Image (tube, grey):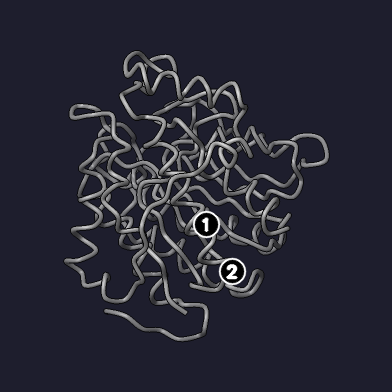
């Protein structure tokens, strides 16, 4: 089966302008490299889509969605404490990110593809009732709720290799024993949002269903090689029916606002590992979302390493695509 990748430049509308780390050039950095490597010939492109307000409210509070709509019309000020500015049309731009992740999910669930990738997505800091850290609406959370409401899938794995802890996902499902979380990130003592300690393993009935792996500043591929087997074993132990990957490229060396030092080989290895696990556990179903990353070369290499690994691991036991 094919791999679906959103190649619609309309996604670049989710941008806070030149000078802000989350700028429109992030999309073109990814797409230009996809074409340069010839990967576009091995994937099925799909267009972006707008999520409806009803879909957004599967995860977000109604009052918060209305707040974003008002800020979108006003087009100024901040949606949080200063990281996430409002701009004219921010509601529609953020709803497009969510809708595109939902469209990738639909492609997997209706059998159009075995895996899917959405580059401008993985907005993992937004809470149910608040924006945070460049994230207005949390497509990861909406997808988790969609899996339950639309497709009846309860046990879901969320894997996050962004340099920042995925706090908006973690705390929204902290008490849910059916959402299995593995989150590798820079130690919160050194980086926003300051959360994701190794002791945070879930609460109530969900204790032991979350694995936070905080990493020291400068952690490189050698450090990753030491910790990833623990993550893989955790996912094998806690089998699920669908896998989500937030593959932020800000964990690569040279990102301007983080301090990890991975190479794109990490993104390839994680994706290959998850493809194998998805084939074993959940009919190959894996949706990847781009996440953070503010060095354009890293976005190009990291996200395309994910796409390439998906192409090489299609879920049918075959390997094809460019070498």
Q: CA distance from mark 1 to mark 2?
A: 16 Å
- Up-down: is 3 above or below 183? below
Give coordinates of residue 207: x percent, y percent.
Answer: 77, 40
Which is in the foreground here, disc 1 or disc 2?
A: 2
In the structure shown, which secondary structural element does the residue marked by tag 1 occupy? helix
Name the residue: 32% across, 80% down.
321
As drawn, which residue projects farthest toward the bottom? 318
Q: Which mark is residue 210?
A: none
First-in-chain label (1 vs 2): 1
The residue where tag 2 is placed is: 278
Image coordinates of residue 194 in percent, x first then y, are 50, 25
Mark 2 closeness class: few <14, some 14–19, many ≥20 residues within 10 Å: many
Give me the residue at 34% from left, 50% from top. 262
Q: In the structure shown, which secondary structural element does the residue marked by tag 2 occupy?
A: helix
Proximity of marks 1 and 2: CB atoms separated by less than 8 Å: no
**Count of picture labels:** 2
Give the residue number, with chain letter if any, for mark 1.
228
Task: Out of 258 and 319, give the one closest to the viewer.
Answer: 319
Percent coordinates x, y for residue 319 in the rendering: 40, 84
Residue at 41 percent across and 59 percent down: it is 117
Give the residue drawn at x 59%, y 74%: 279
- Residue 222, compared with residue 70, is above or below; it is below
Residue 70, image quadrant: top left
The C terminus: image quadrant: bottom left
Q: Is residue 299 left or right of residue 121?
A: left
Toward the right, the furthest residue is: 205
* Residue situated in front as seen by the camera: 26 or 227: 26
The local crowd at label 1, few if under 14, some if 14 to 19, many if 20 or more residues have their Cα within 10 Å, is some
| Left or right: 259 in relation to 185 | left
Q: Quadrant of residue 256?
A: top left
Query: Which x, y percent locates residue 238?
Result: 72, 58
């Amino acid at each position: 089966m094919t791999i679906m990748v959103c190649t619609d430049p309309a996604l670049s509308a989710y941008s806070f302008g030149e000078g802000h780390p989350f700028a429109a050039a992030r999309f073109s950095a990814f797409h230009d490299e996809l074409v340069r490597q010839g990967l576009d010939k091995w994937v099925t492109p799909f267009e972006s889509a707008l999520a409806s307000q009803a879909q957004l409210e599967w995860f977000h509070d109604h009052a918060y969605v209305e707040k974003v709509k008002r800020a979108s019309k006003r087009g100024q000020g901040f949606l949080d404490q200063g990281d996430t500015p409002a701009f004219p049309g921010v509601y529609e731009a953020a709803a497009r990110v969510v809708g595109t992740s939902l469209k990738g999910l639909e492609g997997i669930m209706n059998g159009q593809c075995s895996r899917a990738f959405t580059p401008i997505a993985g907005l993992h800091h937004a809470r149910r009732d608040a924006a945070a850290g460049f994230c207005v609406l949390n497509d990861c959370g909406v997808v988790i709720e969609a899996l339950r409401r639309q497709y009846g899938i309860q046990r879901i794995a969320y894997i996050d290799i962004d340099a920042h802890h995925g706090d908006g996902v973690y705390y929204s499902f902290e008490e849910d024993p059916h959402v299995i979380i593995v989150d590798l990130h820079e130690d919160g003592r050194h980086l926003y949002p300051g959360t994701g300690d190794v002791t945070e393993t879930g609460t109530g009935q969900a204790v032991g269903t979350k694995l936070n792996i905080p990493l020291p500043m400068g952690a490189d591929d050698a450090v990753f090689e030491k910790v990833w087997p623990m993550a893989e074993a955790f996912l094998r132990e806690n089998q699920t029916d669908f896998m989500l990957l937030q593959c932020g490229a800000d964990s690569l060396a040279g990102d301007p606002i983080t301090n990890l030092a991975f190479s794109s080989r990490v993104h390839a290895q994680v994706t290959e590992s998850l493809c194998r696990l998805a084939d074993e556990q959940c009919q190959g179903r894996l949706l990847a979302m781009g996440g953070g990353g503010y060095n354009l070369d890293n976005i190009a290499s990291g996200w395309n390493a994910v796409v390439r690994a998906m192409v090489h691991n299609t879920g049918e036991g075959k390997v094809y695509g460019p070498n």
